[in-house]
Image: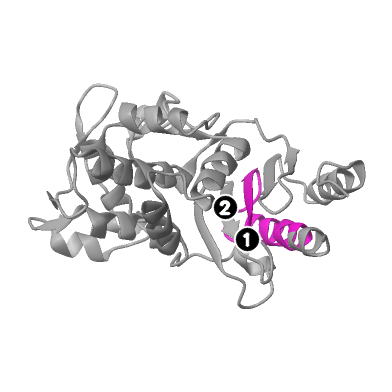
């Protein structure tokens, strides 16, 4: 039975409706069968930290094309310029998922190290350093080159003036699914670069969403993102004995500390059971 069949679609939509979430976007691509399941997959959400996936891909892209080797060292500092008026702002370690980088202020670290911190523990400080060095326009251009829809990077993290004006990064479930499908197929930069990025995503520290709904031991390469009443997770899942599948779930309106991760985990299990029951 194809993923897009009414029975699968109705089951997932009913599960979402029972959650009382204000909005959920979901996109699945099964690399084994080549079909998809899409639920409000083109609805645009504040990207939260899922945009860090785009930043990582552009870092590897620039490493391959020459301007920025992954071993180049970047100065670690905590002062950035608002995209609104260029005024300075700093990040708070208390609001960051990774605090160790603040101990290296005034030093320089390899870009590769910053990418790992940005993905595995969602370092905001590493993210802002990378966005500034890579350039938001170049990140967006590469996402378009990968064929992604609805992914937009405007800025780094904690630019409060931009936030107040609604100048936020955006993502859709379809867009996140599309770039992860390319990654799973080894088509982001190169097969070797894709493998390296997948390995980093498998080291993700925050696993209360998609991985929590899976049987123990199923490998998952993923990136989460959350803030007030937002929780997202986008993943490549590697079930035993079959090709992987990609799942992206974006939620708005549920508490990001418990309710939203629980919904994402439940949807993850439903998709896993559906796909692993197929030939």
Image check: 269 left or right of 48?
right
Is residue 47 or residue 240 the one in the foreground?
A: 240
Reading the image, the residue beneath label 1 is: 210
**Position of 30 compared to 65: left or right?**
right
Total labels: the figure holds 2
In the visual, does 34 lie left or right of 170? right
Where the C terminus falls, by quadrant?
Answer: bottom right
Asked if one can make out residue 121 in the rendered structure from this viewpoint, the answer is: no
Image coordinates for residue 260, horizontal then vertical, percent: 65, 54
Residue at 36% across, 47% down: 56
Magenta residue check for 232: no
Relative image position of residue 143 (x, y in whole percent):
44, 33
The disc label shown at residue 125, or none: none
Residue that numbered label 2 is attached to: 233
Residue 214 seen from this side: yes
Tell me where the magenta segment starts and ends, as one range. 244-271
The image shows residue 277 at horizontal and vertical percentages of 83, 64
State the residue at coordinates (27%, 32%): 135
Q: Secondary structure beneath disc 2?
A: strand
**In the rendered structure, are the residues bearing label 1 and label 2 in contact, judged by CB atoms less than 8 Å apart?**
yes
Density class for disc 1 (Cα within 10 Å; few <14, some 14-19, many ≥20) is many
Is 18 situated left or right of 69 in this image? right
CA distance for labels 1 and 2 = 7 Å
């Amino acid at each position: 039975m194809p993923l897009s069949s009414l029975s699968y679609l109705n089951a997932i939509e009913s599960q979402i409706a029972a959650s009382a979430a204000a909005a959920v976007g979901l996109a699945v691509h099964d690399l084994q069968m080549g079909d998809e399941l899409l639920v409000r997959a083109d609805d645009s959400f504040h990207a939260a930290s899922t945009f860090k996936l785009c930043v990582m891909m552009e870092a590897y892209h620039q490493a391959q094309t020459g301007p920025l080797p992954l071993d180049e060292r970047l100065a670690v500092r905590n002062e950035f310029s608002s995209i609104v008026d260029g005024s300075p702002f700093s990040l708070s370690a208390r609001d960051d998922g990774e605090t160790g980088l603040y101990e290296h202020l005034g030093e320089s670290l390899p870009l590769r190290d910053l990418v790992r911190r940005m993905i595995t523990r969602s370092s905001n400080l590493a993210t802002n350093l990378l966005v500034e060095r890579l350039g938001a326009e170049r990140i967006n251009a590469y996402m378009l080159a990968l064929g992604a829809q609805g992914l937009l990077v405007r800025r780094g993290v904690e630019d409060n003036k931009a936030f107040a004006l609604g100048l936020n990064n955006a993502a859709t479930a379809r867009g996140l699914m599309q770039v992860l499908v390319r990654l799973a197929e080894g088509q982001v930069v190169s097969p070797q670069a894709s493998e390296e990025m997948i390995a980093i995503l498998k080291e993700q520290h925050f696993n209360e969403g998609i991985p929590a709904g899976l049987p123990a031991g199923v490998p998952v390469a993923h990136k989460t993102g959350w803030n007030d009443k937002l929780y997202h997770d986008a993943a490549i899942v590697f079930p035993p004995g079959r090709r992987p599948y990609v799942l992206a779930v974006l939620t708005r309106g549920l508490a990001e500390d418990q309710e939203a991760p629980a919904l994402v985990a439940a949807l993850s299990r439903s998709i896993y059971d559906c796909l692993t029951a197929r030939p």
